[in-house]
Amino acid sequence: MAQAARDRATRIAVIGGSGLYQLDHSAPAGTFPIQTPYAAEAVELSLEQTAAGAAWFLPRHGRDHSVAPHRINYRANLWALHQAGVDIVIAVNAVGGIADSMIPGALVLPEQLIDYTWGREHTFATGAHALDKHVDFTWPYDRDLARTFDAAAAMLDLPVHRGAVYGCTQGPRLETAAEIRRMQRDGCDIVGMTGMPEAGLARELGMRYACIALVVNRAAGLGGGAITHDDVAKHLREGMGRVRALLMAALPQLIGGSD
Ligand code: HPA
């Protein structure tokens, strides 16, 4: 099945987060179960044939959003994408806003990250594969991909924030106000639960990785009240249309430049 997947020309994958369970609204052109050494069950990749071109799609929380951030099998997901021949991964993540400008609805292309997660299977370098144990991670996100998204956003007249620092917490609970104050002191601009180990694993496999983050709430203690599910759901609904538009505008350039 991995060979059959590799034969599908596209080398681009989108990993969807909360609120993005499909790239386009059309039915996928096919689904490919990819077996990996990291799970008994296969990872199911959807091939989507969008107006902008073909791309793999993988919803990291599952199609029914049943997998919590700390339970996601990040290694199986990234391994499956690599097996399918993917070399560009676009991650979509819902986040909380910490910096003043990171208000609900803002689109962010982070440039740096700080990893606060613990206990997750975070590396392929376990001795089973001939992998470099100390990959360079100075710039965790691919800067050329971020430039491509920035240009696509400008074409659409869509404001995006560049240069942000993404702090990745363990979840699944949201943070305390004091934790957010600490993250603020650390220099985090946004906070999410799924950016790591995904970005690090992509780097270990030599895949280019970019993140489009959508702010869906002010982080704990900054919004003048509790974070409510209804508010988050509203901003997810409103914002994902813009995320899709940005993906569709950038996809032809990614496809054109992936060889
Ligand atoms: N914290 C962590 N993860 C999140 C948040 C948040 O406030 N909002 C959306 N994902």
Image (cartoon, rainbow, N blue to C red):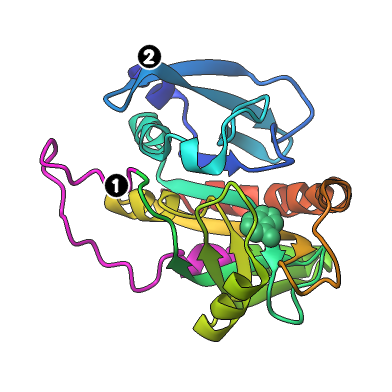
Relative to residue 16, is residue 245 depicted above or below? below
Percent position of residue 250, x then y: 65, 54
Query: Label 1, label 2: how many angstroms apart (C-alpha)?
Result: 20 Å
Closer to viewer: mark 1 or mark 2: 1
The circle drawn on residue 61 is none
Residue closer to the observer: 48 or 37: 37
- Between residues 227 and 13, which one lies in front from this camera angle? 227
* Total marks placed: 2
- Tell me if I can see residue 147 in this picture: no
**Secondary structure state at the residue bearing disc 2:** loop
Q: Is residue 156 left or right of residue 1?
A: right
The amino acid on which the numbered mark 1 sits, given as a three-letter code, is Leu
Magenta residues span 121-148
Residue 23 lies in quadrant: top right
Q: Main secondary structure of the magenta part?
A: loop
Q: Residue at x 41, y 16 (%)?
A: 41
Could you tell me if residue 215 is visible in this image? yes
Q: Position of residue 146 (x, y in %)?
A: 56, 66
Residue behind mark 2: 1
